[in-house]
Image (cartoon, rainbow, N blue to C red):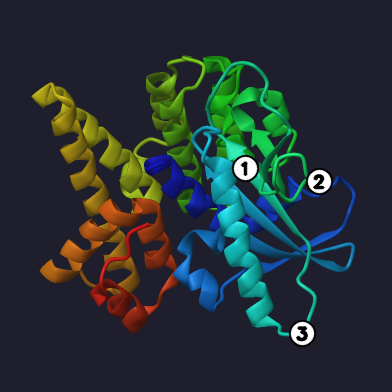
Amino acid sequence: MGDADITLRHLARRRPDDLARAFVSEGRPVEVLGWIDSQVTNIERRLDKALRLRVDGEPRVLHVEFCFALRDDVPDRVFEYLGFLFAALRIEAPGEPVPPIESVAVVLSGRRRRLPATGQRRTAWPGRPFSGTHFRVDAVYQRTVGELRARGSVLWLVFAPLARNATADALREVVAEIHARAASAEERAELYAALLVMATVDPWGHNLRKELVMMVEDKEEGLLRRTPIIGELIIEAERRGEERGEQRGEQRGERRGEEKAIAELLGRLFARRIGRRPTAEEERSIVERARAIGPGEVEDALLDLEGEALIRWLAEPTRRS
């Protein structure tokens, strides 16, 4: 999903409580214990979207997958991830029961007709009882701005541009709410950046991104440019990629522009983590890995791995997804 995926992964890491509470029945006590990190999930990096919870005092695991659309391969991916996750939890606590796991696909765009509330991946023979996995489908783009606001968290406000009834007036209220509720200027910039990236998805053809940029700038003059966070870099990357594509007037030029912008984004994130710019060899490895396994997984590694572990990871042969 490119920029949208990177943005949402980053925000989910910062606000795991808000992510979890949206998918636990209202009124039930929930405690977020942290992201699952194990030997197996380090191999399958996308699984860091699994949260360890305690619901009503009982252990639970929540796996959230952000999807641009509910494509045919999404059930396969969910089933595959669950296999890795189940194996990781068994290795982590041999002899102990694996906690119940709930998977949710958060869908950003797709058909106008209502999506089903659940999806499934069947593995049984035809005519035999069901075996496989079911997962919840949260089609945020089919919700209203009011429904997203009712979730009670600024995390879910960033999806407002996707809502079927999004308008300039509604988004102006969302921008004001983010301004009032964000804990710091840095968090406001992250949330505004995510808001703008979601506006580029535009599943209903609202075409509100330019108006939204003006709203944010009116509310927080220069904030996005002043705050060196990943959300700001994503917006700059997208803008430069679009400009290069328009100037050249061809899809190939646009793709090259986007790749170069994403490479710069990841290189600057490396610098924030390590304290220096990547060497030419490290930069080349970052670019190759972004092409091979996707910028989202590279961004995950840059956020997860520390110091020498990150440098060793970049020196390893690139694993194709």
* Pair 1/2: label in front: 2
Which residue is identified by label 2?
Answer: 129
- In the picture, which quadrant includes the C terminus? bottom left
Which comes before the other along the chain, label 2 or label 3? Answer: 3
User: Please, is residue 92 above or below residue 286 in the view?
Assistant: below
Separation (CA) of disc 1 from disc 2:
24 Å
User: Please, is residue 287 above or below residue 316 in the view?
Assistant: above
Which residue is at a point 78% across and 81% down the rendered structure image? 96
Q: Is 275 situated left or right of 117 in this image?
A: left
Q: Crowdedness of circle 3 by 10 Å Cα count: few (<14), some, many (20+)?
A: few
* Pair 1/3: label in front: 3
Residue 280: give x, y in percent of width and height.
11, 67
Which residue is identified by label 3?
Answer: 95
Separation (CA) of disc 2 from disc 3:
29 Å
Marks 1/3 in contact by CB < 8 Å: the verdict is no
In this view, the residue in front, 67 or 229, is 67
Residue 285: give x, y in percent of width and height.
21, 65
Which residue is at a point 42% across and 19% down the rendered structure image? 211
Q: Secondary structure at mark 3?
A: loop
Which comes before the other along the chain, label 1 or label 2? Answer: 1
* Pair 2/3: label in front: 2
Q: Is 241 situated left or right of 76 in this image?
A: left
In the rendered image, is residue 229 in sight?
no
Three-letter residue code for mark 1:
Ala
Name the mark on residue 105.
1
- Classify residue 166 by image quadrant: top right
In this view, the residue in front, 222 or 301, is 301
Q: Secondary structure at mark 1?
A: strand
Residue 18: give x, y in percent of width and height.
68, 50
Marks 1/2 in contact by CB < 8 Å: the verdict is no
Which residue is at a point 40% across and 66% down the rendered structure image? 301
Q: Is 105 situated left or right of 150 in this image?
A: left
